[in-house]
Image (spheres, rainbow, N blue to C red):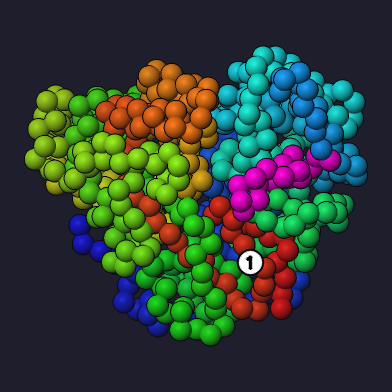
Amino acid sequence: MKRRTFLSTAAATLAAPSLARAQGARTLKFIPHANLTVVDPVWTTAYVSRNHGFLVWDTLYGLDEQYRPQPQMVEGHTVENDGKLWTFTLREGLRFHDGEPVRARDCVASIARWAKRDAMGARLAALTDEMVAIDDRQFRIRLKRPFGLMLDALAKPPSNVCFIMPERVAATDAFTQIRPEQIIGSGPFTFKRDEFVAGSRVVYERFAGYQPRATGTTSGTAGPKVVHFDRVEWHIIPDFATAAAAIQSGEVDWWENLTADHIPILSRNRNVNIFTPDPLGSISILRPNFLTAPTNNKLFRQGLLRAVNQADYMAAVMGADPKYWRTGVGVFTPGTPLATDVGLDLMKGDLNEARRLIRESGYNGERIVLLATTDIASLVALSQVTGDLLRRLGLNVDYQAMDWGTVVQRRASREPIDRGGWNIFCTNWAGLDHINPAGHHAMRGSGAQAWPGWPDIPRIEELREAWFDAPDLEAQKRIAAEIQKVVLDEVPYIPLGQFFQPLAHRRSITGVMQPFGIPVFWNVRRA
């Protein structure tokens, strides 16, 4: 697969964008990586919804840049009864955006809803014997047996995040989306529903009643969240040339995901700073649907896996320079303790072997619906390479192009193909999501409770449970290698590689951070 050219040659001249000028120094203008179509970050794992969540809601714990949980909304906690009794105490003065105090019962309800959708949350729920509010500032979690990852679960920034919502909002069924009119936050910014225009603009205003932590160091998603802008505007710009022109001219301050094609152009602008914020990068995957034919057939999925050459995908995403990408990617993020090369020789782009397995699966020309993203550069590339690969395998591809927000909605459908169902989509996960089995949604084999695609693979679930109980790192590594063997055999997903995407911001703003790939809007100021 040759390097895709996603932009017209005219993009080099960067025509002026059609954005209004900033209303003043107290407004920050930002280009997110995707359109915000789902405002409920518990209902979906979509990162744009998660990023929105970090403006609007706060968390009990944050994660610092050394991957250590730190108190955020809590003043502290105690652990008793050999690790089976946890008591949490909230900081004083915490308020929701409607002026109501944040109470312990809000935390209990928020944890309970989150645990129904999140992989680590589900593990916590399975081990919980009782979770109750003691009074307005204290709540207790009594466990059936110790859970050493308690704070990691409550602090984790990957989707899904345990955001704290009012009890009445958190009472919403976890499989029903919270609507924009229901949003009542606990974080540093309020969501301006009256200015929300899907596909165009999302607006947030500084919440005067928010109280940052008085102590600690800002690091990752932890520490004091001090806001220096009265207003943050997200401008949805699906055309990458227009986005580049906007950051060039100063019409916007910050572009979350700089496309590979524009790195050379923007690098020459002395008013723009470019850097790669996340050393763990992003992990690209292909997700098959286990509920629809032919991707519900194991031999068919094995054929797809053998056809994949990760270098084709990564070169399409980030260009020919390998400093921006890596192959040899398995179930766990390269360079982290559980990463292994076990079984990776199966992915060597062997089209003949792939065609043989697909024939043996009984494939007979059935339509294969590929949900292809059009507005995120990396996903455009992944979709195009996948569509081309499927055609070279002789498959009947229905390439359905749509924006990422529509993909997020469509992928939730469990309907058959003739009623709007799907077979394949491609996406990216933050490297932090894939460092271990605890919060790794893509590898789960929990059937109807799994992330969209719904693989039912009991052996993976057994190994995941064994990993939680492993006595040391060496035992965890052995289990991780076995998990990778099962994943590459059953194929709940196909790893496509790892890439490192830079951001771009105007040098007129300082303190720009995207820890773990999350743009955070506190401690950013105009120089």
Q: Is residue 131 left or right of residue 179?
A: right
Q: Which residue is located at x 24 percent, y 31 percent?
A: 301
- In this rendering, position of residue 40 left or right of residue 241: right
Q: Quadrant of the C terminus?
A: bottom right
Look at mark 1 in the image and give the residue it sits on: 512
Residue 206 within the magenta-colored segment of the rendering: no
Q: How many marks?
A: 1
Q: Which residues are magenta?
A: 58-75
Residue 408 visible in the current orientation: no
Between 178 and 88, the residue placed more toward the observer is: 88
Mark 1 closeness class: few <14, some 14–19, many ≥20 residues within 10 Å: many
Tell me the element at label 1.
loop
Q: In the picture, which quadrant includes the N terminus? A: bottom left
Check disc 1 and give the amino acid type. Answer: Val
Q: Residue at x 80, y 30 (%)?
A: 78
Residue at 88% of width from left, 39% of height from top?
101
* Residue 328 shows in this picture: yes
Rendered position, 526 above or below 121: below
Q: Quadrant of residue 376?
A: bottom left
Q: Write down the quadrant of residue 111 in the picture.
A: top right
Residue 71 colored magenta? Answer: yes
In the rendered image, residue 7, in percent from the top left (x then y), is placed at 34, 69
Would residue 458 appear left or right of 341 to someone viewing this image?
A: right
Q: Which residue appears at 43% of the width and 39% of the height?
A: 338
- Percent position (x, y) of residue 187? 76, 48
List x then y, in percent, for residue 317: 34, 59
Residue 16 percent across, percent down from the top left: 50, 80
Q: Nearer the viewer, residue 474 or 384?
A: 474
